Amino acid sequence: MATFSSSFATLLSSSIPYPLTRHACNFPTIQRIVKFPNSTSTFLPLKLNPLHLTQFSFLTSSAGFRLAGSSVGNAEPDGEDPPLVGEDSAVFELAKQKLSSWVYFAGILGTVLFVLDVAWLDNSTGYGKAFIDAVSGLSDSHEVVMLLLIVIFATVHSGLASLRDMGEKIIGERAFRVLFAGTSLPLAVSTVVYFINHRYDGQQLWQLQDVPGLHQFLWLSSFVSFFFLYPSTFNLLEVAAVDKPKMHLWETGVMRITRHPQMVGQVIWCIAHTIWIGNSVAVAASVGLIGHHLFGVWNGDRRLAIRYGDNFEAVKRRTSVVPFAAILDGRQKLPKDYYKEFLRLPYVAITAVTIGAYLAHPLMQAGSFGLHW
């Protein structure tokens, strides 16, 4: 890459005419932002004779040239967005999809669900009930058991995420994804099932379900929370390890609102459900889930900083953890057509799946009750 960069710089420099005379002065330096495949932006300095600044004036606004130490030309003129160093999120290009990849995805999904049922969910063959019984045996309090289940899941989930770089070097990206998902998924399902089965077993702290309009408001809040899913969730082929999994640095879409949308969405969901249920089990679940995601804010930034270095720091400077904070203080400038970053197939899918999940609540509850966990 270094050799290619040097050759490209030489080629670019050779296209600039040599000055007719030499001047005993420091010429301003012009920098060209060059994007190489799989690399960060590279700034190439070029010395210019002032006699030739005029012929480059039109390039400074259209081609991304930056004059260092000079007021001639700006890389980011007023009203223009700074260049992105991260990826465009929630992009789905149908023309680039391979039918074979989605056939593999369907096969992997079916296999995972079958193994999950036999090895974990089915009380006659799986270990899920034994796991729940073991944790429940530690305390008679549903609140304590709820917190313990979340702590176990969070420790495994975040622990493996923290070991990702090392694990991928040892066993490869796809194998580590299988290990990560195969360990996290049963624990997540167990936690969700226990919550569904015992959500009304705690001490009632308030009862607001008769308040007019509250159900509609909380339903809308829960619905909105799913639009704060982390963009990597949309990459289903990477989630299933059909495509090689990657650690992405996202910068558009929901990331402009908050750098940690998953945390924000979880907080909204927890608050809505806690207000509606109004008991100690719901409070315990919310405390555990929010605590886990707040840890994820720190841990996620730490991991991205290690992986992406200066590029992550650039994204961090123009984004915020608190929703809309970077927009309000001017660090994040939304494009005029920002809404188009949400008019994409993944968000259409989220809308359909969220509504479907709500309508399927009775089936989810019946399935959970049938496990007797």
Image: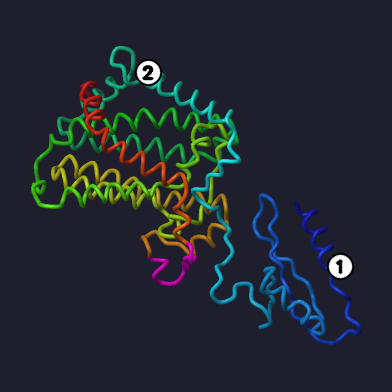
Horizontal relation, residue 181 to residue 25: left or right:
left
Q: Is residue 311 magenta?
A: no
Please determine whether, in this image, residue 309 is positioned above or below residue 73.
above
Q: Report crowding for label 2: few under 14, some 14 to 19, many 20 or more residues within 10 A (C-alpha).
A: some
Judged from the image, the secondary structure of the residue bearing numbered disc 2 is helix
Q: Secondary structure at mark 1?
A: helix
Mark toward the start of the polypeptide (1 vs 2): 1
First to last magenta residue range: 325-337
For this orientation, the residue located farthest to the right is: 20
- Please give the name of the residue rendered at 55% of the width and 53% of the height, measured from the top-left corner: 87
Is residue 75 rendered to the left or right of residue 312?
right
Disc number at residue 211? none
Q: Position of residue 53 (x, y in %)?
A: 77, 81
The local crowd at label 1, few if under 14, some if 14 to 19, many if 20 or more residues have their Cα within 10 Å, is few
- Is residue 222 positioned above or below 147 on the image? below
96 or 36: nearer the viewer: 96
Which residue is farthest top? 124
Q: How is the image coloured?
A: rainbow
The residue at which mark 2 appears reads as 119
Say whether residue 336 is magenta.
yes
Q: In this view of the protein, which residue sits in the foreground, 243 or 187?
A: 243
Read off the residue under disc 1.
14
Residue beneath the point at 26% across and 51% down: 221
With 306 as the anchor, is 9 left or right in this view? right
Nearer to us of marks 1 and 2 is 1
